[in-house]
Image (tube, coloured by chain):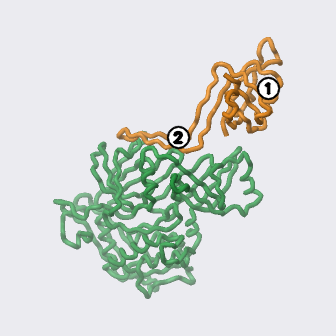
């Protein structure tokens, strides 16, 4: 899904010469925009739960930031960086928040102060779930992965537990969609934590759930699980790629996975697995050889073979072939793109015509007015193709349900 | 054609002896990008600034001292580009790492000076 923006914002964002550009930098509830010398880049990747850091270069000829040396309580105060366009009709700014975080470091050089901010959700990396002596367990109850993630985020991550779209820390709409998606596939798990960081737990949930948990510029956690083409699929073509940095296309066999074993029914007491399933794409094995992968997480695990098979099939379904990766630098017309968004990529140089890819990462550079994006045929840990059926393909052309569960 | 005037305020202006080669330019925070299909994307952020470069000669000692003091203190100054239109005021500062008037004029050694005065709007 793409970030929701106003129609005014979208119209401005997608034009070739937008007017009334507005950038607002707020720190400790004060507008510091006029003191900004250089805005740092903002990067996010689908494999990273949080949004990374932001570095702002500020003028300090006025010595206003020397106060950080004498008044250290000013550190860890919050800041936001917003970008958008002034709305003439309303008289207000129509902006989106690209970054929100806390000040972690200030350095001084000549007449400038460099402020380094850490994403608000980085705090999840400081919190642990249980201890070896006092573990936190869901060993007797089958839970939906989304409920597990919610519980971790709110009970241990310190995030808001408000179950509505007004939740300030969690994008409730995407969480609910994710929850329903997992429920529809009957994915149930159990869990046992002995001091893992909340980040590590989320990472395991991403892997086990074939999902993406990520933070956006509004400092909320988002959740998504690949389900094929959506109604807001992005399109990217040569008319979007900056000529100075031509697209970089690569095809890699590094992530081929055509035989997956998933263990289920872990018992933390006896330290034994209840069983395992395997799923293989024979055609891929015949073409490329055997590439195996095993899922045997002992903090979050599947309860039954059905759930385990679902993961195995999803991974093999999308990782059976070498992966196409594309890196592009584009205009700001994709400011509303979110990690995991489907992209139809067209390029004359590589004879790509609406090639289905997924957005794996991006870097927004407000100084250069560009967005660097990485598209991948894969989807985070697994693969992503929009088509569940490819005519005449020896594997993807089969209509047999066990082979094409998404058809 | 009126005079080019500079000073702390409109009541204490000096006349600048700008010679040939005076320049001005407006700088915007602007990015222009071409795509692979030749489309041009232009992003312009508001709040640019205007630069004025004025080579001057026959600057007397009093004005030299005054201008150099403004340069040393980074004072906000009023610039009137044409005294016939005194309402056309720009608020500027002298910008450069070196003091503006650094040349002697023969045969007025230590009496009259020359140099480049570089101003930018704030």
Camera-nearest residue between A116 and A319: A116
Q: Which element is circle 1 on? A: helix
Q: What percent of the width, then of the height, locates residue A367? A: 54, 46
Q: Is residue A363 visible?
A: yes
Return the x and y of residue A372 as percentages of the image width and height.
45, 50
The residue singled out by tag 2 in the image is B30
The residue at the point 45 percent across, 85 percent down is: A139
* Colour green maps to chain: A
Q: Secondary structure at mark 2?
A: strand
Say if residue A361 shows up in the picture: no
Above/below status of B78 relative to A111: above
Q: Which chain is orange?
A: B
Answer few, some or many: residues within 10 Å of disc 2's Cα (few below 14, many 20 plus, some between 14 and 19): some
Relative to B121, is A119 above or below?
below
Q: Dot 1 corresponds to which residue?
A: B64
Q: Quadrant of residue A234?
A: bottom left
Q: Residue at x 31, y 56 (%)?
A: A356
Q: Residue at x 34, y 48 (%)?
A: A237
Up-down relation of residue A116 to residue A127 (above or below): above
Q: Earlier in the sequence, mark 1 or mark 2?
A: 2
User: Which chain letter matches label 2?
Assistant: B
Cα distance, mark 1 to mark 2? Answer: 36 Å
Few, some or many residues within 10 Å of mark 1 (<14, 14–19, 20+) = many
């Amino acid at each position: 899904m793409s970030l929701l923006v106003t129609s005014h914002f979208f119209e401005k964002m997608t034009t070739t010469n937008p007017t009334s550009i507005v950038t607002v930098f707020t720190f400790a509830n004060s507008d510091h925009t006029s003191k900004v010398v250089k805005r740092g880049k903002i990067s996010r990747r689908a494999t990273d739960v949080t949004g990374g850091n932001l570095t702002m270069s500020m003028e300090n000829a006025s010595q206003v930031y020397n106060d950080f040396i004498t008044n250290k309580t000013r550190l860890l105060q919050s800041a936001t960086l917003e970008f958008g366009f002034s709305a003439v009709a309303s008289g207000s700014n129509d902006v989106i928040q690209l970054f929100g975080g806390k000040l972690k470091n200030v350095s001084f050089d000549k007449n400038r102060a460099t402020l380094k901010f850490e994403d608000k959700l980085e705090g999840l990396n400081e919190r642990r779930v249980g201890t070896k002596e006092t573990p936190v367990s869901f060993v007797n109850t089958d839970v939906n992965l989304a409920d597990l993630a919610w519980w971790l985020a709110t009970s241990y991550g310190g995030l808001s537990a408000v179950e509505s779209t007004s939740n300030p820390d969690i994008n409730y709409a995407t969480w609910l969609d994710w929850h329903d998606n997992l429920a529809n596939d009957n994915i149930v798990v159990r869990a046992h934590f002995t001091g893992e960081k909340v980040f590590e737990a989320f990472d395991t949930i991403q892997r086990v759930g074939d999902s993406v948990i990520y933070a956006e510029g509004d400092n909320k956690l988002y959740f998504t699980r690949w389900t094929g083409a959506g109604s807001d699929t992005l399109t990217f073509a040569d008319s979007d790629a900056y000529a100075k940095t031509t697209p970089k296309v690569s095809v890699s066999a590094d992530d081929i996975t055509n035989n997956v074993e998933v263990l289920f029914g872990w018992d933390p007491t006896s330290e034994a697995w209840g069983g395992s399933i395997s799923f293989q794409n024979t055609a891929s094995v015949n073409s490329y050889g055997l590439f195996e992968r095993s899922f045997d997480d002992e903090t979050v695990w599947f309860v039954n073979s059905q759930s385990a098979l679902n993961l195995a099939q999803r991974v093999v379904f999308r990782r059976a072939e070498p992966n196409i990766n594309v890196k592009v630098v584009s205009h700001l017309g994709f400011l509303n793109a979110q990690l995991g968004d489907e992209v139809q990529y067209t390029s004359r140089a590589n004879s790509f015509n609406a090639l289905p890819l997924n957005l794996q990462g991006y870097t927004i550079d407000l100084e250069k007015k560009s967005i660097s994006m990485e598209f991948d045929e894969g989807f985070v840990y697994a693969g992503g193709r929009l088509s569940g059926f490819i005519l005449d393909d020896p594997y993807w052309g089969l209509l047999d349900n066990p082979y094409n569960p998404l058809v | 054609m009126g005079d080019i005037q500079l000073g702390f305020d409109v009541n204490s202006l000096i006349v600048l002896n700008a010679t040939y080669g005076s320049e001005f330019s407006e700088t915007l925070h602007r990015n222009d990008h071409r795509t692979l299909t030749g489309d041009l994307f232009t992003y312009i952020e508001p709040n640019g600034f205007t630069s004025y470069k004025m080579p001057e000669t026959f600057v007397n000692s009093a004005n030299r001292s005054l201008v150099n003091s403004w340069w040393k203190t980074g004072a906000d100054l009023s610039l009137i580009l044409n005294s016939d239109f005194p309402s056309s005021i720009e608020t500027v500062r002298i910008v450069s790492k070196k003091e503006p008037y650094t040349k002697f004029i023969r045969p007025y050694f230590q009496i009259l000076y020359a140099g480049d005065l570089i101003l930018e709007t704030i």
